[in-house]
Image (spheres, rainbow, N blue to C red):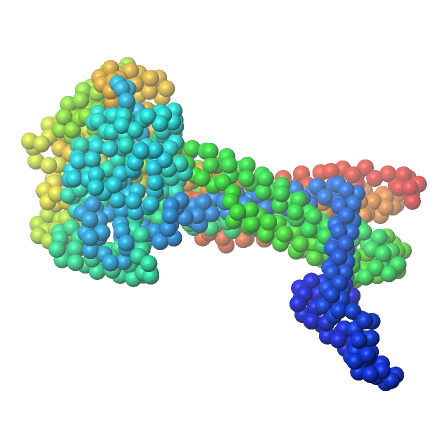
Amino acid sequence: MALLRRIANLFRGHKLRREIEAELRSHTEMRIEDNIAAGMSPEKARRDALLRFGNVTVTSERVTAANTVLHVESFARDLRYGVRQLRRSPGFALTAILTLALGVAANVVVFGVLNALLLRPLNVAGADTLFQVVQQPEGYRSQSYPDYVDYRARNKGFRDLLAYRLNMLAFSTGATAEKRWMYEISGNYFDMLKVQPQLGRVLHESDEHGPNSAPYIVLSDAFWRARFQADPHVVGTTVNLNKHPFTIIGVAAQGFYGTELFIRPDFWVPMVNEEQVNGFSYLDKRFNHGISVLGALRPGVTPKLAVDDLNSVAHQLAKEYPAYDDALSARLIKPGLMGDAVGAARPFLSGMMLLALLVLAAACTNLAGIFAARAADRARELAIRLSIGSTRLRILRQVLTEALLVSVAAALMGTLVASALLDSLSRWQPFAEFPIHLTVAADARVYAIALLLSMVSGLLPGLLPARQIWQTNTMQAMKSGAAVPSLPHRLTLRDLLLCVQIALCALLVTASLVSLRGMQRSLHAPVGFAPQGAVLASTDMHMAGYTDESALPMQRRMIEQAGRIPGVNFVGTIDEPPLGSGGSSTPVWREGSADLRPSNSAMAAYYFSISPGYLQAAGTRLLAGRDFTWHDDQTKPKVVLVNQTFAQRMFGKVDAVGRHFLGADKSLYEVVGVVEDGKYESLTEAPAAAMFYPVAQMNAGDTTFVVRSQLTPSETAAALNLVLASVDPSLPFTISNWPQALAFVLFPARVATAALGVMGLLAAMLAVTGVFGMAAYSVSKRLKELGIRLALGSQRRQLLRAALGRPLVLLLCGSMLGLLLGVLASSLLARLVYQATPRDPLVLIGAVVTMMLVGMIATWIPAHRALAVDPAQLLRDE
């Protein structure tokens, strides 16, 4: 009870001080009364009492200080004793620390990524007031430039709006050009974000005086240091962007990477120079949605009020431009995640966080079993301490101190491992052709989570021995050296903990196998083309100064030259290959439609521009009609190829070949062929409508050569590089085989597979240690019994059943429970991997085999020890 009072006193200092002062005043008044009764005058009686007891405040402070010192000294003694106990049992200490550190590390890594992507704001001033303006339908994250201009001029909820667009172009300071990523930005971009230059100046709205009026460039800090060796005299230098001269006017502040959290551009250029750089201007195209819009709220304006205001502007625009903006709408989302593109990762990251917590739960149950076994082994020691006057609460406090030491050590180890992994992720660039840099370095929030998780995960298992300590029979424990034994067939707390741990392990193993099967399905999913055996060479004809019209003869010449390479079977071009970095869609209308507003369209369809020969090079099957020829040019009626989904939605069961429809440019298109369905933006998309224009009628500048060859990919790439360079050496190409080019679209599946695989491996390791610990403990406690059984004639098989029967039964029960949980969790797994189904026979068989291997590995050493029992040696030792 004294200890409880001291613990309580730590949390009620002011109240305790008042109680001490009241107690001292009471004694002083009693002394005064005794002195007066003895014949003293009231003044002398009071003076004598005060001299005897001293100043009330000073005495109160001394008592409180003494009480605090006692607490600190007592806690220090517990710490020293706990360290000695852990040093005496290094196996227990190391197992407990490693077990908890694994769970902490897994959670810190997942939370670090979650923190970087979803919780951390942009690194700019007033980031909490910034919102990205997207459209109401999910996935429609871009705006047209005219809509942006009208939003900015008419809205009342934002103090300002800016626009930006990620793009790639050819950068050169001499004859050799290189592909570089940049932001095309509105003139107020830096000023609205309050970003200052570290060298020169940044772009301002005053630099813009109409189209092609601001040939200026602002470098990023990283590009300035890597490309120009941090030369301070770089300001004023002229460089070429797609063979057009631009003047470097400054270098952005170090640490500013733009307005996307994980995309780092090399430089920024004014959006008004789009036509000069790329040969096409979207500045006056209200139907062309391709820019991102970011807004800073006015003080006192809520996001809801801002959205309502933007939608009122959208309603006005719909009246003014019914052909384009009848479906315009607005909503606000967190900026920095490429709109809904990365925002869709929220379910995946949330699911991974849940699975990481399950790993930590498995670690906790493992740790709880270890602590329970340790408390049982120390029953004799605890009984002796109880018999000589120690309280059960005092013993529990020392056990919790040991748990605290384990928690702190596990927190340090787990955080160090997690920090190293997060640092590796920060330096990892998964795609060389994309400027993706995921900054996930641990910050104060991540470290706080690590400390909290380790403390809770260590102290809760440490509390479980409290029941054993409270129920310890002192006399029985001192006689037998162990706690009161449970009945052989009675289910103990350690049994329940182990069963829960195995169930969690089986669940995570099932999830990892589901991800592997999903990855396998994604690699063999029908995508509408055959990537194996094909090589891609991607470029943008604008990078060498070509316009859409002047590029066509050069593209045709390159196709002819590539087709002459020995071993090459087919060559064709497409503006953007399916499942590339992103597809574009456009509304289409049925023939005869008079109302060509987007809301009245028959559907929205993906569109591509292809050359003759592309279908054969890509391995896309032509189901009906004919392919394009070079005669399908601007002098001929407009023609198009459509896929099966397009044909069915537009024309029903009628043969689509020879039928017509209206495009977004209000032209009439004739369907000359039908091709097979495919995947165009992601592997998980539903069947989507798609159409293919002839490159001679619609050339976009972006060009990917598809070369199908009998040669190896490396041989084809080398020969193709030589041929293309000989035609135009100033045009930069990115050459890769098509399966490698699909790395971007397969990246989510691969990440899910790797992450779930790691979770399953950690869970299997924890299950092995848990089953091994229980089996080893069971054998060690029953060696004498096993020796007697063997001496009485028991067979070795019977010994194994007696020693390992319970761990194996628990393994079986936990595995079945985990498999059942895996089947029930199919909806969660479906958020993490492609076509997830735990009911897959291969998944179930794999999970069963894995758990059997876990059991065999975990019980191998205990089984060997049980079979090696020597009755004679045991009796001599006894």
Q: Where's residue 465, x and y in %? A: 73, 56
Pick the front one: 537 or 639: 537
Q: Which corner quadrant holds the N terminus?
A: bottom right
Identify the residue at image location x=83%, y=59%.
Answer: 390
Q: Can you give x and y, in whole percent of width and height, for residue 317 in the image?
A: 16, 55
Q: Residue at x 81, y 47 (%)?
A: 782
**Residue nearer the viewer, 702 or 8:** 8
Q: Relative to 792, is 715 on the left or the right?
A: left
Q: Can you tell which quarter of the image residue 688 is in?
A: top left
Pick whichever, 815 or 234, lies toward us.
Answer: 234
Q: Quadrant of the C terminus?
A: top right
Q: Please, is residue 492 above or below residue 226 in the view? A: below
Q: Residue at x 87, y 84 (%)?
A: 39
Q: Nearer the viewer, residue 852 or 67?
A: 67
Left or right of 462? Residue 512 is left
Q: Quadrant of residue 476?
A: bottom right
Displayed quadrant of residue 529: top left
In the displayed structure, does residue 745 sit left or right of residue 847?
left
Query: Number of marks in the image?
Result: 0
Q: Position of residue 460 (x, y in %)?
A: 66, 56
* Residue 71 against residue 788 in the figure, above or below: below
- Residue sitting at the far left: 635
Relative vertical location of residue 68 with respect to residue 223 in this rendering, above or below:
below
Query: Residue 795, percent across and down?
Result: 81, 42
Residue 837 left/right relative to 869? left
- Can residue 249 be spotted in the picture? yes
Q: Residue at x 70, y 41 (%)?
A: 94
- Is residue 585 at least partly visible in the picture? no
